[in-house]
């Protein structure tokens, strides 16, 4: 009897979420119960915190109203697949909501039935969009979801990591936080082998394997993961150095060129400094081109040579 009532209430909640308003008679017909039973079930939903409004009279009915807290939502199979695909897309590329989408994706994929996981994988592997602008490597949303769960559960993971010099080694770490900086995602974790905090670029991580071993939460130095990552990135070595002093306010450059993160710092109200250093020369050229402002450049000889060659090819194309 209890299981029948629970199933009926879940069905009732699903109906309320699909239409703005239902009459008591319509709900009773859909659920194969009396109108009186519908009223009792509505009261039970209210006791559980669902804000169900009702209006009396011939034209009266029931509707799920906005509340102070978001109640649990029920999704059918098609809706669950669509939401998962959307969250994976958002986690991989939409500015400003990546981390929020990632948390929601981790919750949803944890409870997604096996039959739907196959649909999600098949749909995402066979459908693609046109990326008109790519500033840097993108992290795999499935990898991000796996690491997000490991961070939440404080579970040690093993993975292979490729350094900027191209060497790949096995790592074992306690994941702590996922942090976005510019166009890149980083895993902040405590390396169990080196017994020290490390930053791992997600696009260089492969073969993640949860070990099943959970550990107590480890406090991040300074108690601020984002600040800790920013400090590490500001001192991290890169292959090519390129520092631009830009003749424009930092806010103006940030608005024109999103994704600069902590690499852009104001010098005064009219100038700012951009650390465009990178391991790849084309990335440096792309970053500087996007500034759309005058600047002076302090850079390695290889950077200057690459920029001169690029400019000469452009001039040759224009004159040809």
Image (cartoon, rainbow, N blue to C red):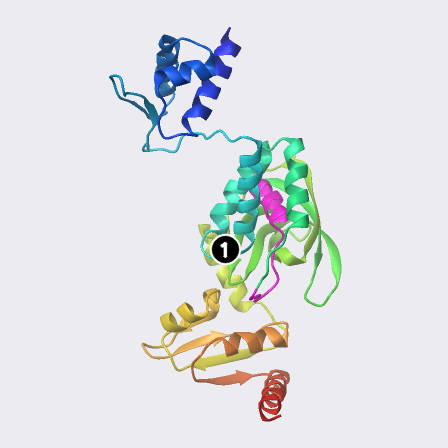
Q: Is residue 102 above or below residue 204?
A: above
Q: Mark 1 — residue?
A: 94
Of residue 299 and residue 4, the one placed in the foreground of this image is 4
- Residue 272 position by quadrant: bottom left
Picture residue at 33% right of the left edge, 30% below the top: 65
Give, as a single range, the part of the protein colored magenta.
Answer: 132-153
Image-based side of 166 in relation to 190, left or right: right
Q: Position of residue 278 (x, y in %)?
A: 59, 72
Is residue 142 magenta-colored?
yes
Q: Is residue 41 above or below residue 213?
A: above
Is residue 166 magenta-colored?
no
Q: Position of residue 47 (x, y in %)?
A: 35, 18
Quadrant assignment for the C terminus: bottom right
Look at the image and tell me whether residue 153 can be seen.
no
- Residue 12 position by quadrant: top left
Look at the image and tell me whether residue 105 can be seen.
yes
Q: Position of residue 116 (x, y in %)?
A: 63, 34
Picture residue at 52% right of the left edge, 84% below the top: 298
Image-based side of 223 in relation to 286, left or right: left
């Amino acid at each position: 009897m209890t299981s029948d009532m629970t199933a009926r209430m879940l069905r009732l909640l699903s109906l309320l979420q699909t239409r703005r308003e239902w009459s008591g008679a319509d709900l009773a017909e859909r659920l194969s119960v009396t109108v009186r039973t519908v009223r009792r079930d509505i009261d039970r939903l209210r006791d559980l915190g669902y804000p169900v409004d009702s209006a009396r009279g011939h034209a009266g009915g029931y509707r799920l109203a906005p509340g102070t807290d978001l109640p649990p939502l029920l999704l059918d199979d098609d809706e669950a697949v669509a939401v998962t695909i959307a969250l994976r897309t958002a986690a991989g590329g939409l500015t400003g909501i990546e981390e929020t989408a990632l948390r929601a994706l981790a919750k949803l994929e944890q409870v997604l039935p096996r039959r739907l996981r196959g649909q999600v994988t098949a749909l995402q592997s066979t459908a693609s969009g046109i990326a008109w602008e790519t500033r840097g490597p993108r992290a795999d949303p499935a990898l991000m979801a796996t690491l997000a769960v490991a961070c939440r559960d404080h579970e040690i993971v093993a993975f292979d990591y490729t350094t900027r010099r191209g060497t790949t080694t096995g790592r074992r770490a306690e994941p702590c936080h996922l942090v976005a900086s510019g166009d890149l995602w980083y895993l902040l974790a405590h390396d169990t082998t080196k017994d020290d905090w490390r930053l791992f670029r997600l696009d260089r991580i492969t073969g993640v394997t949860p070990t099943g071993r959970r550990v107590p939460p480890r406090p991040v130095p300074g108690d601020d993961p984002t600040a800790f990552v920013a400090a590490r990135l500001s001192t991290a070595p890169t292959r090519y150095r390129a520092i631009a002093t830009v003749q424009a306010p930092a806010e103006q450059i940030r608005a024109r060129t999103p994704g600069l993160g902590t690499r852009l710092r104001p010098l005064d109200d009219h100038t700012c400094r951009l650390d465009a250093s990178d391991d790849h020369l084309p990335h440096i050229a792309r970053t500087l081109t996007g500034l759309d402002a005058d600047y002076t450049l302090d850079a390695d000889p290889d950077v200057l040579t690459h920029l001169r060659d690029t400019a000469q090819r452009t001039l040759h194309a224009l004159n040809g």
